């Protein structure tokens, strides 16, 4: 969180609060609809936590949170790159390459489209870097030639296959977690749709993504993560070359296949 955070100004907060009125502007701030969340107590608890972390946060508190969070992000990126380089075939399977990126600056804000660095370019200037980017004479763009892109689904599948072939592990696919067997201060087992998993002396790492809040709730813990709607479309272009760089604004990412 920093000064570019969506809730950092009073006008941003006023805009967000207006969307809490049923059948008004909708929940475009969160990309969810009123009927979806009006009866969702987890959403309101998450919103209260989100509010306290941004509306009432001092600059000192924000800097402390960034100091705690950014090293974890850097470590995660470094470990991902190291893994791709060490696991045979994973780098190629992930389609990872230093293709560069184009950020589209516009009226909408938020996400990484707020974190612009470098001089803004006109559409004529940016076309030398990515010919498929378009826009009117007022459009502005920021280019990052060192940006790396990859494909996470292929990365995950290839890494999972490698682990099954080379390590003494078992992956349960299409298996629902139905509950946890908690004894004292540790998880002793996991109840799943395919039976009971005895954890033994091992540790449990919860990496549920958008479902982390639900899984944590089974353990009596509150995880301040609320999933948002997202859609992926695969578009095939005929009669010419496709996009070569990552292009994105506040709402949409166009990733070369």
Image: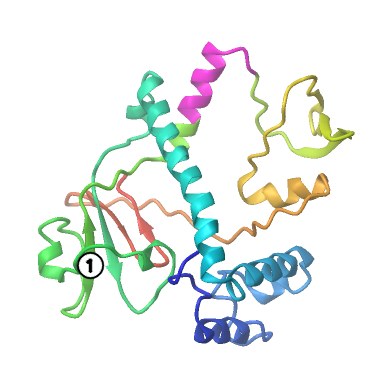
| Residue drawn at 23 percent across, 64 percent down | 142
Residue 5 in the figure: left or right of residue 122: right
| Residue drawn at 21 percent across, 59 percent down | 143
Mark 1 highlights which residue?
141
Where in the figure is residue 151, as x and y percent of width and height? 39, 40
Residues drawn in magenta: 157-169
Placement of the C terminus among the 4 image quadrants? top left
* 88 within the magenta span: no
Q: Nearer the viewer, residue 88 or 8?
A: 8
Asked whether residue 256 is in view, the answer is: yes
Q: Does 240 sit above or below residue 41?
A: above
Q: Does 73 sit above or below residue 195?
A: below
Q: Quadrant of residue 23?
A: bottom right
Q: Residue lying furthest front in this view?
A: 60
Q: Quadrant of residue 24?
A: bottom right
Residue 147 in the figure: left or right of residue 70: left
């Amino acid at each position: 969180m920093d000064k570019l955070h969506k809730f950092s100004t009073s006008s941003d907060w006023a805009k967000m609060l207006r969307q809490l009125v049923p059948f008004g502007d909708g929940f475009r701030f969160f990309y969810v609809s009123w009927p979806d969340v009006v009866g969702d107590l987890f959403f309101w608890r998450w919103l209260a936590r989100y509010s306290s972390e941004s509306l009432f946060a001092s600059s000192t508190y924000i800097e402390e949170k960034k100091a705690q969070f950014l090293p974890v992000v850097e470590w995660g990126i470094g470990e991902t790159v190291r893994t791709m380089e060490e696991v045979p075939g994973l780098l190629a399977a992930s389609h990872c390459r230093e293709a560069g990126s184009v950020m589209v600056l516009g009226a909408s804000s938020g996400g990484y489209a707020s974190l612009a660095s470098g001089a803004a370019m006109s559409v004529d200037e940016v076309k030398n870097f990515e010919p498929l980017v378009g826009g009117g004479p007022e459009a502005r763009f920021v280019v990052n030639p060192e940006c790396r892109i990859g494909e996470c689904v292929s990365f995950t599948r290839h890494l999972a296959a490698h682990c099954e072939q080379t390590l003494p592990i078992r992956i349960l696919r299409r298996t629902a977690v139905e509950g946890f067997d908690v004894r004292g201060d540790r998880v002793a087992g996991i109840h799943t749709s395919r039976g009971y998993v005895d954890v033994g002396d091992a540790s449990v790492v919860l990496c549920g993504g958008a479902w982390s809040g639900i899984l944590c709730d089974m353990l009596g813990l509150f995880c301040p993560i609320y999933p948002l709607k997202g859609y992926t479309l695969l578009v095939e272009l005929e009669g010419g070359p496709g996009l070569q760089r990552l292009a994105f604004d506040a709402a949409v990412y166009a990733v070369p296949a």
